[in-house]
Image: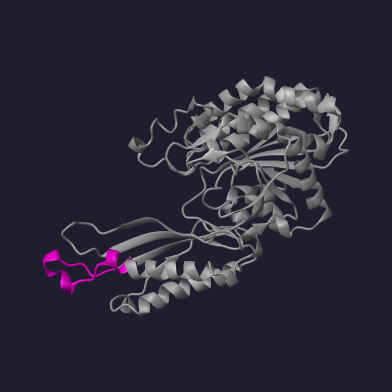
Amino acid sequence: MDTELKTRILSAVDAAFDDETAFLSELTAHPSTRGQEQSAQDFMAAALDERGYEVDRWQIDVEKIRDMPGFSPVMGDYEDAVNVVGTHRSQSRKGRSLILNGHIDVVPAGPLDMWDAPPFEPHVADGWLYGRGAGDMKAGLVSNLFALDALRKAGFAPGADVFFQSVVEEECTGNGALACLERGYRADAALIPEPFEEKLVDAQLGVVWAQVHLKGLPTHVAYAGTGANAIEAAIPLIEALHGLEERWNAPGYRHGDFAHVHHPINLNIGKIQGGDWASSVPAWCIFDMRIAIYPGQDIAAARAEITETIMDAARNNAFLKNSLPEIVWHGFMAEGYALSDDHSATAKAAIGALEGAHRSVNESDLDRVAITATTDARFFGLYADTPALVYGPRAEAIHGFNERVELESIRRITQSTALFIADWCGLETI
């Protein structure tokens, strides 16, 4: 790509960056927690339609994806789970096709009084845009859209088909991205701008969720010794799970990309509830857990080891051995994915194109990172033979209070994405 064309594309991003920031702010104002994504998806569908893309908006049918590789078990129905895809159809089809994927769902905001400002009233301060989901990952979703806009403003369209995906369910199952595969969307490569500080994600962990149900023996607290406290019974099980966590973090257990990462496997007891009355020994307790697994780690074997860990701890407990816990698998059942393991010519070419785009914008080489989280990249890389490049802006406090994303980082990511599309897909004049 010649210098004049690069300059035109980069300048087009700059010229529209105020509009991009305003668009991101408006999108962040939609409180698109799980089950509440519809208004945000309406907003995205309207933006894609306004730009002339072929818009596909559909409700996910669990029965159509249940038996596909990568499916995660769900609780409840999907009546409110809607995906949106905007398609650019190339006239020349001279280049390589591309999926631009991002998720619209965000995690709950938590106690509102612990935010400095309301989480769904985004604002800009000191070069950062604040709000729940601004970084994870609406900034990336918007950068994908405005990268395409920049090409159009420069007088071009991608010279291959491009599928812009705004999906749900990334934060709890990934079934939104899986539903895109079921619907037939395929391409030569995928780009997912998750907020990992303008670095290319070389490897990501998988994630397993489970819910553990415990039953106690209720009685008046005055006679607590004759009952069994279901909440306290969870403690030895949680301690045993932390023992499993440490075993999986042992050097001999690790995937190579995580050999030098401090404590890559993290167990989280993310939710606990139980009991009915302060003066009654609790008869029930439920806790939700999340633990990571490595790329290549067999997910069925991991589930079996989790089960064995919980049941062994229960059998060694005076009460629980006669009232064994029940394990319910729901949410993430996600394998790890390592782009570094993909040695195909397509993967090398896609990485090379992104490295070139990044270098043109930043005048520095593209760094790589192994992350201790999961993304939807696994669906493309593991189940669709499609190299998935995770590369997005710098954000802070994702899933925390005062989540924020750096505006200049969004600008650079948008510019790099536009140059990457131009290189990977080729260009045709409009």
Q: Position of residue 194 (x, y in %)?
A: 61, 43
Q: Position of residue 116 (x, y in %)?
A: 38, 32
Q: Quadrant of the N terminus?
A: top right
Asked whether, in this view, residue 242 is left or right of residue 232, the answer is right
Q: Residue at x 55, y 47 (%)?
A: 169
Query: In the displayed image of the protein, which residue is found farthest to the front?
Result: 364
Numbered range of the magenta stretch? 216-234
Q: Left of 219 or right of it: where is 4?
A: right
Tell me the quarter of the image containing the C terminus: top right
Residue at 64% from the left image edge and 23% from the top image edge: 17
Residue 105 visible in the displayed image: yes
Residue 221 drawn in magenta: yes
Q: Within the image, what quadrant is residue 224 found in?
A: bottom left
**Residue placed furthest toward the left:** 222
The image shows residue 206, relative to residue 17, as above or below, that is below
Query: In this view of the protein, which residue sits in the foreground, 151 or 86?
Result: 151
Say which quarter of the image contains residue 414.
top right
Residue drawn at x 62%, y 27% as measured from the top left? 46
Question: Can residue 61 be seen in the rendering of this structure?
Answer: no
Residue 207 position within the rendered picture, expressed as x and y whole percent measured from the top left: 54, 59
Q: Is residue 299 above or below residue 411?
A: below
Q: Is residue 71 magenta?
A: no
Mark count: 0
Asked whether 324 or 341 is in front, the reply is: 341
